[in-house]
């Protein structure tokens, strides 16, 4: 049995190492280090993110976490940032199977950026994805290499030849670079936005020599950093059926000592089957069996809320859910005292100002006066009790039902709620799309895709731009429920505003 905590936590990032002392956890780590698989059950709610952080703190390199639902990615990212101390990267899925310019949309760019990061000297430690994203292929390692071109200061290169190469690689020539896959020429200056980087580059030429390379912000045009060498990546879109020509899988870019975390395995399989059943054209997609074979070719950990029959090394966590608070300020101290009668409690607050406010509100309660209450900064989207540790972990927003005002999550989760089916919507409703932002719902339309008909939600964005979302991907569209009486501003498809807004909220 685990020893009860005796010292205060300076931050919730200290908790994973303590969780790893739970009975059975060291045996799981040993099995993984020997290349075997393991199971951890009892991972209720956000305790699964804490468990993942505990695994990551002992992993030799990267961890790939596979979730069933895209709507869980942001919550996991926020909670893991709190427990692990580093922000995980997300590998997203396309809403609709693309047929051309596959790397030059926002999702394709994000997928390519992750591949570049995995090949870099400082790859992300934790990657979050869904099975749907892992059923969609990526360019093979050799394919990407053949589409890359190194540019460095002092190199002599004809700007016209470079522009021709960019066009051949699927780049668009524009007046001003704003989006991945664009380039612009002005005299001796060439701006270039490779689809696998966060910001574009400005190359200044003196004759045929590259005199300088600077990274700059596409929105403000402000220079960010001087660079000596960059690598531009072209598109597969100039090949016949660009998407279908992809031959790789995300797991191909993981090191052999990477671990995979499969969260609720049965649910992963169910969601994968439902996705494939609703896709009109399977060509180019990876089968569930093939994806699972890739994911289990390295040491893998199965996380489950319930005990599961297994011949693998198994750790059973003793985790309980926490009763919901009423939200009444006058009652919250008593409710907190009743939840943690003998336990210690740690409340994660989003900033120091919230720590100060909650300290004042809760200071007269029995829990606080007995010095069993601690407030720290961080994000936990829902509470849980670690029984063997005598510890209750809560998110500050839970106490007063202030998820909308306080939860440090991307905007789409702050101002939206999940849609169970298109019957929840009526034409003219405001909705929030995961990748593109706020739009108007304009009804359902049936589209013919390769001889097969499929229903799509029609979303209208700024300037009349329209996006068709397959009904099978309705979980990527949320209903807007902002509290303001003023209608929200529609987002620009492909623009950087929505990404910046999410980052600002985070």
Image (spheres, rainbow, N blue to C red):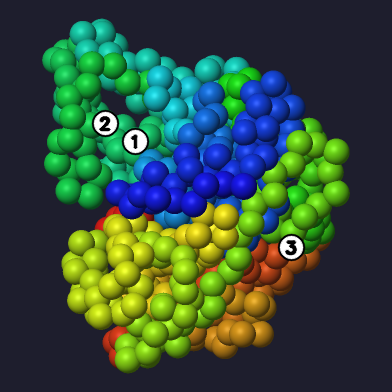
Quadrant where the image shows the C terminus: bottom left
Lower position in the chain sequence, tag 3 or tag 2: 2
Q: Of the residues tagged 1 and 3, which is closer to the observer? A: 1
User: Is 211 displayed left or right of 161 in the figure?
Assistant: left
User: Is 486 displayed left or right of 444 in the figure?
Assistant: left
Question: Which residue carries the number 1 mark?
Answer: 193
Lower position in the chain sequence, tag 1 or tag 3: 1
Instruction: Answer few, some or many: residues within 10 Å of disc 2's Cα (few below 14, many 20 plus, some between 14 and 19).
Output: many
The image position of residue 321, as x and y in percent, is 58, 69
Q: Is residue 90 above or below residue 374?
A: above
- Give me the C-alpha separation between circle 3 and circle 2: 39 Å
| Point 78% across, 33% down: residue | 293
Question: Which residue carries the number 2 mark?
Answer: 201
Q: Tell me the element at label 1.
A: strand
Instruction: Answer few, some or many: residues within 10 Å of disc 3's Cα (few below 14, many 20 plus, some between 14 and 19).
Output: few
Q: Are marks 1 and 2 in contact (CB under 8 Å)?
A: yes
To which quarter of the image does residue 86 belong? top left
| Point 54% across, 72% down: residue | 322
The image position of residue 373, as x and y in percent, is 34, 66
Lower position in the chain sequence, tag 1 or tag 2: 1
- Give me the C-alpha separation between circle 1 and circle 2: 6 Å
| Point 24% across, 66% down: residue | 355
To which quarter of the image does residue 438 belong? bottom left
Q: Is residue 18 above or below residue 96?
A: above
Question: Which residue carries the number 3 mark?
Answer: 448
- Give me the C-alpha separation between circle 1 and circle 3: 33 Å
């Amino acid at each position: 049995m685990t020893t009860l905590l005796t010292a205060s936590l300076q931050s919730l990032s200290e908790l994973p190492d303590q969780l790893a002392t739970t009975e059975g956890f060291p045996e799981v780590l040993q099995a993984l280090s020997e290349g075997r698989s393991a199971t951890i059950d009892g991972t209720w709610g956000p305790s699964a993110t804490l468990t993942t952080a505990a695994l990551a703190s002992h992993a030799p390199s990267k961890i790939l976490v596979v979730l069933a639902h895209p709507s869980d990615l942001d919550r996991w990212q926020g909670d893991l940032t709190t427990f692990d101390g580093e922000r995980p990267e997300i590998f997203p899925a396309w809403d609709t199977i693309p047929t051309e310019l596959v790397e030059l949309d926002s999702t394709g760019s994000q997928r390519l950026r992750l591949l570049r990061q995995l090949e870099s000297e400082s790859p992300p430690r934790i990657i979050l994805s869904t099975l749907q994203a892992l059923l969609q292929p990526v360019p093979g390692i050799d394919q990407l290499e053949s589409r890359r071109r190194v540019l460095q200061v002092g190199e002599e290169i004809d700007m016209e030849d470079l522009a021709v190469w960019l066009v051949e690689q699927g780049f668009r020539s524009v007046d001003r670079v704003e989006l991945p896959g664009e380039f612009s020429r002005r005299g001796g200056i060439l701006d270039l936005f490779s689809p696998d980087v966060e910001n574009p580059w400005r190359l200044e030429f003196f004759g045929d020599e590259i005199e300088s390379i600077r990274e700059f912000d596409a929105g403000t045009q402000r220079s960010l950093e001087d660079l000596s060498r960059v690598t531009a990546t072209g598109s597969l879109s100039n090949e016949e059926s660009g998407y279908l020509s992809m031959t790789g899988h995300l797991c191909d870019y993981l090191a052999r000592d990477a671990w995979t975390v499969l969260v609720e395995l049965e649910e992963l399989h169910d969601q994968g089957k439902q996705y494939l059943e609703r896709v009109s054209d399977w060509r180019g997609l990876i089968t569930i069996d093939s994806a699972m074979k890739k994911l289990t070719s390295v040491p893998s950990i199965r996380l489950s809320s319930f005990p599961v029959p297994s011949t693998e090394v198994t750790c059973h966590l003793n985790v309980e859910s926490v009763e919901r608070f009423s939200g009444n300020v006058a009652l919250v101290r008593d409710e907190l005292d009743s939840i943690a009668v003998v336990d210690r409690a740690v409340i994660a607050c989003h900033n120091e100002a919230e720590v100060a406010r909650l300290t004042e509100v809760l200071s007269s309660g029995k829990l606080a006066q007995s010095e069993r209450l601690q407030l720290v900064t961080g994000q936990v989207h829902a509470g849980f009790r670690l029984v063997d540790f005598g510890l209750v972990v809560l998110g500050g927003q839970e106490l007063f039902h202030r998820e909308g005002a306080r939860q440090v999550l991307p905007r789409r989760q702050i101002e939206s709620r999940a849609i169970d089916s298109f019957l929840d919507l009526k034409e003219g409703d405001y909705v929030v799309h995961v990748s593109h932002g706020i739009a108007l719902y304009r009804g359902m339309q049936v589209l013919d895709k390769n001889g097969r008909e499929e229903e799509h939600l029609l979303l209208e964005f700024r300037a009349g731009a329209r996006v068709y979302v397959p009904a099978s991907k309705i979980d990527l569209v949320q209903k807007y429920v902002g509290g303001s009486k003023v209608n929200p501003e529609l987002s620009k498809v492909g623009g950087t505003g929505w990404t910046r807004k999410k980052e600002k909220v985070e």
